[in-house]
Image (cartoon, coloured by chain):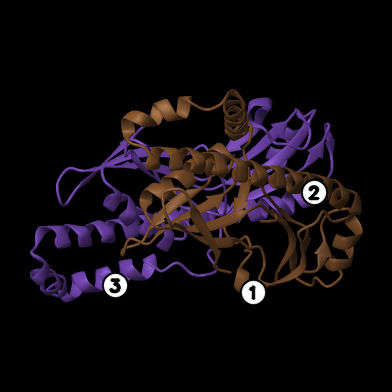
Chain colours: A purple, B brown
Amino acid sequence: MQPVCVLLLSINGFEVQKQNCRWLLVTHKPCTKDDVIVALRNANGDAVLKFEPLVLHVQCRQLQDAQILHSVAIDSGFRNSGITVGKRGKTMLAVRSTHGLEVPLSHEGKLMVTEDYIDFLLKIANQKMEENRKRIERFYSCLQHALERQSIIRSYPKEKVNKKINAYSPKKKRNQEKARDRCIAEENDKELENNDSPGISAAVFPEDDEDLVLTCLW
Amino acid sequence: MQPVCVLLLSINGFEVQKQNCRWLLVTHKPCTKDDVIVALRNANGDAVLKFEPLVLHVQCRQLQDAQILHSVAIDSGFRNSGITVGKRGKTMLAVRSTHGLEVPLSHEGKLMVTEDYIDFLLKIANQKMEENRKRIERFYSCLQHALERQSIIRSYPKEKVNKKINAYSPKKKRNQEKARDRCIAEENDKELENNDSPGISAAVFPEDDEDLVLTCLW
């Protein structure tokens, strides 16, 4: 679930097309100007620097599970998340953000920017990488909170739910409030995202009212 | 349904935050280096050039309608499209692509790139704008084809549907095949998109089995 900072080379002009590209540099860690400069030495086409944030695909047993996950994703700042329902009812949630960068750097092997600009650009990319890490943590906290709440709602008759929710110990209640606070997506949490991000896929099947099983598909 | 090429100014450092930004230049038409250079004269913070492709929000009467639209959107190349189902069942489809650019240009009022680079960048942005226009046309064609097909499926008993579909005149069949061909999304149609795009919202309510009513919400 790490964000990725990559240099992508397109050998067919402006259109960045996956088939005709090779990766010059792919890293899940902050990178330096020198890393990029060295990678660009191998570029004889059009090199593009892309920062690609988290993409998580979750297969859900039912639409309700996808709705819960979708709500958590949006509240955590992954504002381009969406549900896909196949013709046979296969329900997937794609967690996507808008927190990226796509910056053309060279054309036909010729570097179009200065090294100072690359340094400036990497500060931004590395900052986005760190911000993305925080958002992943926020998503995890929000998901735990949502599942805890769902387990209560599903486990008790409706009339008892509110009573049960309000019956937490002060400490647990404070923790809930903290978790809820972490779930509040600031309006300025606008992020960029690329659909082609090396993403994570998982299957979410509630085994009972209280657990979700996450199975990594790749 | 025009794509937008904008210059976005962030006055709070690297993080591009909508609240603290003002638009230096917003255009739905191809723009030139001079347009951007003039706009940048007003920038005393961090200016970012963004190309933002189509965003279309469609409220659907039922999930099935959203599934049809979602399938059309994906097949047309809008690969970040997704369905949202609210707690009260409000079903929305967001048509999103991945066909964008986000390029930091200046820091604290200082231009970090050359005018030649801006010229190079605008060729790419303008090309993406044209590509986006084509994809919007493809989406419209695919939608017409899908609705025509749905109207047949909904209007006839199941056992007659295939017979009816296969009973087209050769000309109509050829037109269908052409439309279907236009709907095939090339694997290399990977696009970038920003969630904050000035989008279009619409409500899709099938008034009967054969029609959809599109109502612009803003």
Quadrant (top left, top right, bottom left, bottom right) of the C terminus of chain A: top left
Task: Confirm whether circles 2 and 3 share one chain.
Answer: no
Looking at the rendered image, the disc whose residue lies closer to the viewer, 3 or 1, is 1
Give the CA separation, mark 2 to mark 1. 27 Å
Instruction: Give the number of the disc on residue B20.
Output: 1
Q: Mark 1 falls within which chain?
A: B
Give the CA separation, mark 3 to mark 1. 28 Å
Q: Residue at x 36, y 58 (%)?
A: A72
- Amino acid type, callout 2: Asn
Number of residue marks: 3
Is B28 situated above or below B98?
below
Q: Position of residue B37 (x, y in %)?
A: 88, 62
Instruction: Give the number of the disc on residue B159.
Output: none
Is A48 situated above or below A151?
above
Kind of element beneath mark 2: helix
Q: Which residue is mark 2?
A: B126
- Amino acid type, callout 3: Glu
Q: Which residue is mark 3?
A: A177
Quadrant (top left, top right, bottom left, bottom right) of the N terminus of chain A: top left
Q: Position of residue A177 (x, y in %)?
A: 29, 72
Task: Confirm whether circles 3 and 1 share one chain.
Answer: no
Give the CA separation, mark 2 to mark 3. 47 Å
Q: Position of residue A11 (x, y in %)?
A: 75, 28
Q: Nearer the viewer, residue A193 or B1?
A: B1
Q: Residue at x 39, y 31 (%)?
A: B161
Task: State which quadrant residue A142 falls in.
Answer: bottom left
Looking at the rendered image, the disc whose residue lies closer to the viewer, 2 or 3, is 2
Q: Residue at x 62, y 26 (%)?
A: B171
Task: Point out the tag, 2 or 1, that comes first from the N-terminus.
Answer: 1
Looking at the rendered image, the disc whose residue lies closer to the viewer, 2 or 1, is 2
Q: Mark 2: give few (<14), some (14-19) or many (20+) Cα within 10 Å.
A: many
